[in-house]
Amino acid sequence: MYPDKILLAAEKPGRYVGNEINMVRKNPADVATRFVFAFPDVYEVGMSHNGLQILYGAFNSRADVYCERAFAPWPDMEKLMRDNGLPLKSLETYSPLGDFDFVGFTLQYEMTYTNILNMLDLAGIPIKAAERGEEHPIICGGGPCAVNPEPLAEFFDFFFIGEAEEACHEVFNLYGSHKAAGGSKAAFLEKLALIPGVYVPTLYDVKYNADGTIADFAPNNPNAAPVVQKVFVKDMDGAFYPDKPLVPLIETVHNRAVIELFRGCVRGCRFCQAGYIYRPHRKKSVETLAAQAKQQLEASGHEEISLLSLASNDYPHLEQLATLLCDNYADENISISLPSLRIDAASAEILQKVQSVRKSGLTFAPEGGSQRMRDVINKNITWEDIAAGAKLAFEGGWDRIKLYFIVGLPTENEEDLAAIARLSEDVVEVYYQLPKEQRRRPVAVTVSTSCFVPKPFTPFQWFGQPTAENFMNKQKHVKQSMRSKRIDYKYHDAETSVMEGALARGDRRVAAAIEAAWRLGARFDGWSEHFSGQIWRQAFEDAGLSVDFYAHRERPYDEILPWDFIDVRVTKEQLIKENEKAYGSVN
C-alpha cells in the first residue's frame, strides 16, 4: 500500500486502497499468469463499468490466473507519486504494474488515451512497444475503441477485437505453456496472432500515398491474417457473469447491482457505433436474469438493480421480467432502473411499474429534433410516440425529465436545430395539459446536446465532422431558439468532440500526436476541467499532422480506412447502403 502520509494527502484516499467487498485474494506465487486490468480513468468511473466486473470475475475464475486492478490516479495523487518516486500499483496486492505478465487496458473512450501513456509511465514501463524488453509486461487492450486500434498501435503489443471473455482463455492457455517453455515475447506474439479475435500490430505494415491516405495495409508475417474477425459470446445464458460483484467502499458514479439483458441492437440507428459493433443481437432468458439478480443483490447489499442493455425495450420479455423483479423485491425496498429506454407509451407504462419503490430521473433520447432528422439517422420514433410517452410519465408522477439530442449530424440545417427547442417546449406543454391537481410543482426539462462524432463501422464513418466553431454556432442557435423558462439547456464541449473525432478515425501516425499531448501535460481529457484544446492543437502541429485531415475531411467510399482490416461482421457494402439511405431520405 502507499504510505499513510501519501494517502492522507490525497483528495480521496479510498481510490487507492482496495479491500472492497468481494475483492479476489490469491497468492501470486500460486498462479502461472498475473494480469492487471487497467482502467484509464478515475476509480469512481472504472468501478461503475460492468465490463470490468465481468472480466475481473471471468479471469479470476481460472486457478492459474490472478487478475488485479489499477486505475488512473487523479492529478493530486499523480503529483504525490512522482514527487515521492512511487510507482503505480495494483489494488489487490499493491504490486507495481511492472511486476505483472500482462497489463490490459479497456478502451472505452478515445479521450482516455493520454491516461494510458501516463499510467504506463507511472509504472516505469516504456510507453512504446518497440522500447520494451523481455523484462516488461505484455501490454494489451480491448473494448469498443479497439475496433480502430491504429492510433494506439505503437503503444500496445496486441488487441482483443470483440468480446474479450470469448478469446481470453485461449490467450491464457497459450501464455501459460509458452512461459513454462521459456519462450520469448516476440515468439509468443507470433503464436498469439493465430487466435481468432487477436490483432498484433507489429505483424502488419502500412504504406501511405502522397496525399496522406493509406496506400496499403498488409501482414508481414504468415501467422497474421489479412482480416481480423471480431469474436463474440454466442450463448448469453451460458456466458460467465459475476455472482459476487466488487462493491466499492466509496461513492462511485453508479452504486447499484447490474444484470445484462442482452448484447447487440436491432434498431440500426446510423450514428450509433455500439449498435453495429455489438451485433448480433443476443439475449438472456428471464430465468437466467432472475437468478443473476438474486446473486447480485445478495452478494452486494445494493438497494437498486439496473437492467443493462442498449435499448431495454428490445428485450422481448421485459414486462414479464419487470413484474417478476417487482414482485420479488418490492418488500425489500429495492428499486429497479432502466437506463436505456426508448421514449414511447410502453416505456412509460413499464417505468410506472418498476419505479414504484422510488422514482429516479427519467431520460429520453429523441436524438433529432425534427422528424426529418430522425429519419436521416434512422431513429424510428415520431412526435406522437414522444408525446404519448411524456404524457404517461407525467401522469405517473414524474416532473423531472432529461432529453438528449445530437447536433452536427449529416444533412442538418437550421430548421432541424430550431426543432430541438420546439420539441422540448412541446414536452413542457404536455405537462401543463394535465389537470392542475396532477401538477404538484412546475415541470423541469433538461435538454442536453452532444456533438456528433463519426465513428468507425457506422454508416456515417465517411462524414466530415463539423469544426468546433461550427458546433458552437449550432449550440448557440439551439439556445437562442429556446423560449420556455422550464428548460435548462446543456451542451458538450465542441473542441473535445473534434479531438475525439480525430482520434476515433485516426491511423498509426496519430500515435505521435497522442504522445505529444501527453508530454505537454494532457491528462483526463474527457473531463472538462482538465481538457485543453490548445494542448491538443499544439500536439497535432508538433506531430506534423492535421486535425482537419482526420476529423473534418469527407472520405470517399474507395479510400482505405485505418480499420478496414477488421471484420465486425457488418460489411462495408451494408454501411454504404445505409449511408445512401440516410442521404436519400432527405429528398
Image: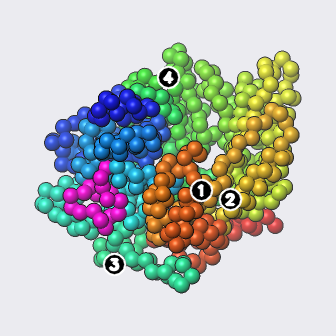
* Residue occupying the point 65% across, 50% down: 493
Residue under pointer 1:
533
Front residue of this view, candidates 164 and 407: 407
| Crowd band around label 1 with a 10 angstrom C-alpha radius: few (<14), some (14–19), many (20+) | some
Q: Is residue 158 above or below residue 103?
A: below
Residue under pointer 4:
303
* Residue occupying the point 29% across, 32% down: 3
Q: Are marks 2 and 1 in contact (CB under 8 Å)?
A: yes
* Residue occupying the point 63% across, 56% down: 495
Q: Amino acid at mark 2?
A: Ala
Rendered image quadrant of residue 357: top right
Span colored in magenta: 123-139
First along the sequence among labels 1 and 4? 4
**For the residues marked 2 and 4, what is the alpha-carbon distance in whole angstroms?**
42 Å
First along the sequence among labels 2 and 4? 4
* Residue occupying the point 24% across, 67% down: 186
First along the sequence among labels 1 and 3? 3
| Crowd band around label 2 with a 10 angstrom C-alpha radius: few (<14), some (14–19), many (20+) | some
**For the residues marked 1 and 4, what is the alpha-carbon distance in whole angstroms?**
41 Å
Residue under pointer 3:
220
Can residue 38 be seen here? yes
Can residue 280 be seen here? no
Position of the N terminus, as image quadrant, is: top left
First along the sequence among labels 2 and 3? 3
Where residue 32 sits in the image (x, y, percent)? Answer: 18, 48
Work out which residue is located at the far left of the displayed protein and give it: 181
| Crowd band around label 4 with a 10 angstrom C-alpha radius: few (<14), some (14–19), many (20+) | some
